Amino acid sequence: MKRRFWPLLAWAISAWVSPLWAQAPQFEIASTPRSWSFPRDHASHPDYSTEWWYFTGSVFDTHSRRYGYELTFFRVGLRPDLPEGSEWRARDLIVAHLTFTEVEWERFHQAERMQRAAAGLAQARSDRLELWIGDWSVTYQAGGTFRLKASHEDFGLDLELRPTRPPILHGDQGLSWKDADRTMASHYLSQPRMQTTGGITLGGLRRPVSGSTWMDHEFFTGPTPREGLGWDWFSVRLSDGRDLMVYRVRQDGRESAVFGTVVEPDGQSRPLVTEGLRLTPTRWWSSPRTRIRYPIEWTIDVPAEELRLSVHPTLDEQEVDARRTVGFRYWEGLCDYDIRWKGQDLIGEGYVELTGYDRLTMSQP
């Protein structure tokens, strides 16, 4: 729901629990900037109805083979107050997704889980960052590192992430408006460039890896989407040390908003100047399983920044089929970028999220 504008998964989950929202309207709304405090604000914010932590990374093993991964935890507020009585009564629903992209062998793996936050089965703590659903977990450790652990059948990960710069607050001190009329917003922060070490398991074989990870953390309260809503989200770690996030919201087949953030090598950030920004799909891919067509190659022109990006997936088939938990499909995959910025040629890597393409949300060639 990614992340970025509220990702597809968050919207899907929101639709699933919307009757509960009607019974509990006292969830807080993201409408004004907040005062942030870290590491506390890496933890859960149960006063808001929806929250997620997105980790997407590119890592290499000791033989220089490349892998992409996504581990995402979602907290869906069933009620804003702590329920009394049985330990089986839940305040939240926890959902998690895990994917791997094997670039060299052109294979994609995915798994998903969903559980009520009750009886110790799953939880998102509000006093410190500690998320779990069964043996999948995300924790914030002493020394300022993040620890990720998740496994499914013969694949999994156990990684430590070390931030190289402070958290980035998008929009107005972390208040990220999602439309031009400023009627929808989230509180939104990122850790774009975290040094990543540890191991991944594929085919039952553990491989030591190292690389870089991007983390998005958002929380908000909002309604279910209207028909025809979708978005395109792009994250880039550039070879000159800068980081870039761009996303576009689509409504009824038309672009309704475009936003972005530039992070300088020293950690300072600013809004991307999006006047005249154009996102042009250059290649579409049809999923052999779902028949959904996704625009997986792009050209992004940002005239006000003298910036052009060409987006290329490392693997076409990076579609996440999340019907078991939320009933939707989306494309989220590891991509490479060719970049020209103010006359300088650069390269980059990152993740792209494409949502809403299981509906006819924009004209397709």
Image (cartoon, rainbow, N blue to C red):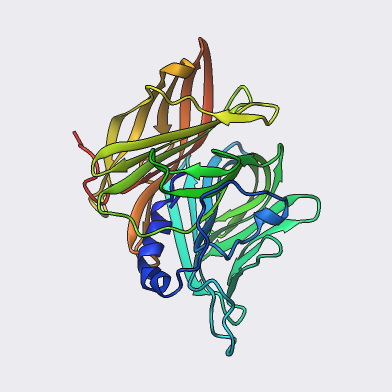
Quadrant where the C terminus sits is top left
- Of residue 289 and residue 30, the one placed in the foreground of this image is 30
Residue 113 in view of the camera: yes
* Res. 223 image quadrant: bottom left
Position of residue 341 in the picture relative to residue 356 (left or right): right
Residue 238 drawn at (x, y percent): 57, 27
Residue sticking out furthest to the right: 143
Position of residue 112 in the picture relative to residue 53 (left or right): left
Residue 50 drawn at (x, y percent): 49, 61
**236 w.r.t. 111: above or below:** above
Q: Residue at x 28, y 40 (%)?
A: 285
Residue 128 drawn at (x, y percent): 71, 62
Q: Residue at x 54, y 39 (%)?
A: 66
- Of residue 164 and residue 304, the one placed in the foreground of this image is 304
Q: Residue at x 40, y 67 (%)?
A: 325
**54 w.r.t. 269: above or below:** below
Residue sticking out furthest to the top: 343
**353 w.r.t. 270: above or below:** below
Position of residue 30 in the picture relative to residue 164 (left or right): left
Residue 214 in view of the camera: no
